[in-house]
Image (cartoon, rainbow, N blue to C red):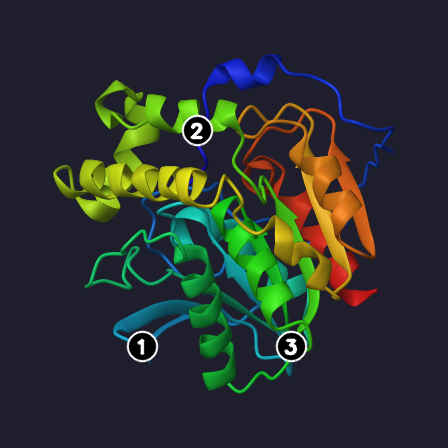
């Protein structure tokens, strides 16, 4: 689920330092079908790629749902955004990355308390990102992967940052986009402003209603807003900034230059506080660059993981 920050953020422009805008031509490979947020189909469109499998494993008090694609000896886990699931957030990656990464198993999960990893619903305590990071690490350990790479979007990117900092010896490489390590004063006001989902467009609201139900989605979303505001007040907005120095994995920050969902300051902050970090910018990209530019995005991720 994309982070729905107010469009006023889009008016903010420019990063704190000069960046190199890179462009990548996607190689020819099987093209995933267009993303449909409510889709639950796991059938690959590429005949050479194994059909994705859906499974559950018990992680703490949650029966965690996840999707597996590919049969390689190495692994990459895809971490979705706020209230997001494997299929709502990563359908083009589940269907496209195995062809580019034949030596990898691609794992995409529904975080505890989201999607098919319910009941129970998520409790948005001040440490919910840390708890998700622990659960993701436990999932990969139960699957037999001592080391693995992480690809995280928005909230999932935050979880990835926390996990890479908490277990640096286990994370091989890290890719994040649309993510932030702290909550600014401006963002705290924005979160409160987007609490009422009845004000959202049907296009943005209905996919989540199909996952959680018309009655339950507003409650869960409001609880998510409360969780972020709790971090803002109790931690002075620090989600994981103090942890970034512990990340050892080579890290790729991917950024949509027209992303209206995060303030621009987060990109240079990550680059300045994580060692061995690179940046790839989509000049016309917004928040959901992995969906809008799925083929190019997949190729960039595959190249980074294989390097």
Q: Which residue is mark 2?
A: 188
Q: Is residue 48 visible from the viewing direction of this image?
A: no
Give neighbour class at mark 2: few <14, some 14-19, many 20+ (Cα, 10 Å): some
Q: Quadrant of the N terminus?
A: top left
Q: Residue at x 19, y 40 (%)?
A: 219
Residue denoted by label 1:
60
- For label 3, the residue is 170
Residue 129 location, quadrant: bottom left
Q: CA distance from mark 1 to mark 3?
A: 20 Å
Q: Is residue 19 above or below residue 100?
A: above
* Marked residue nearer the N-terminal end (2 or 1): 1
Judge by depth and name the residue closer to the eye, 85 or 3.
3
Mark 3, residues whose alpha carbon is within 10 Å: few (<14), some, or many (≥20)? many
Q: Are marks 1 and 3 in contact (CB under 8 Å)?
A: no
What is the secondary structure assignment of the residue under circle 2?
helix
Q: Earlier in the sequence, mark 1 or mark 3?
A: 1
Q: Position of residue 158 (x, y in %)?
A: 54, 51
Label 1: state its secondary structure: loop
Residue 223 appears in view: yes
């Amino acid at each position: 689920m994309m982070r729905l920050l107010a469009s006023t953020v889009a008016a903010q422009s420019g990063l704190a330092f000069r960046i190199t805008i890179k462009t990548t031509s996607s190689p020819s490979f099987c093209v995933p079908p267009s993303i449909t947020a409510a889709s639950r189909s796991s059938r690959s469109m590429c005949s050479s790629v194994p059909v994705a499998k859906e499974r559950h494993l018990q992680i703490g008090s949650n029966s965690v749902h996840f999707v597996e694609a590919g049969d390689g000896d190495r692994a990459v886990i895809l971490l979705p955004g706020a209230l997001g699931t494997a299929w709502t957030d990563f359908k083009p990656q589940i269907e496209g990355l195995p062809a580019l990464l034949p030596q990898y198993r691609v794992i995409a999960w529904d975080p505890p308390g989201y999607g098919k990893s319910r009941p129970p619903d998520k409790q948005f305590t001040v440490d919910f990102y840390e708890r998700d990071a622990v659960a993701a690490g436990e999932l990969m350990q139960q699957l037999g992967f001592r080391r693995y790479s992480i690809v995280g979007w928005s909230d999932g990117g935050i979880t990835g940052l926390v996990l890479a900092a908490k277990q640096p010896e286990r994370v091989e490489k890290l890719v994040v986009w649309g993510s932030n390590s702290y909550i600014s004063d401006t963002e705290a006001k924005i979160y409160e402003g987007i609490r009422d989902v009845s004000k959202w467009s049907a296009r943005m609201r209905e996919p989540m209603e199909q996952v959680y139900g018309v009655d339950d989605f507003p409650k869960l979303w409001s609880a998510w807003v409360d969780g972020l505001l709790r971090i803002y007040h109790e931690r002075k907005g620090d989600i994981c900034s103090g942890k970034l120095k512990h990340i050892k994995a080579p890290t790729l920050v991917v950024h949509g230059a027209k992303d209206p969902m995060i303030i621009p300051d987060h990109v240079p902050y990550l680059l300045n506080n994580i060692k061995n970090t690179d940046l790839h910018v989509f000049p016309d990209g917004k928040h959901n660059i992995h969906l809008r530019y799925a083929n190019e995005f997949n190729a960039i991720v595959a190249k980074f993981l294989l390097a």
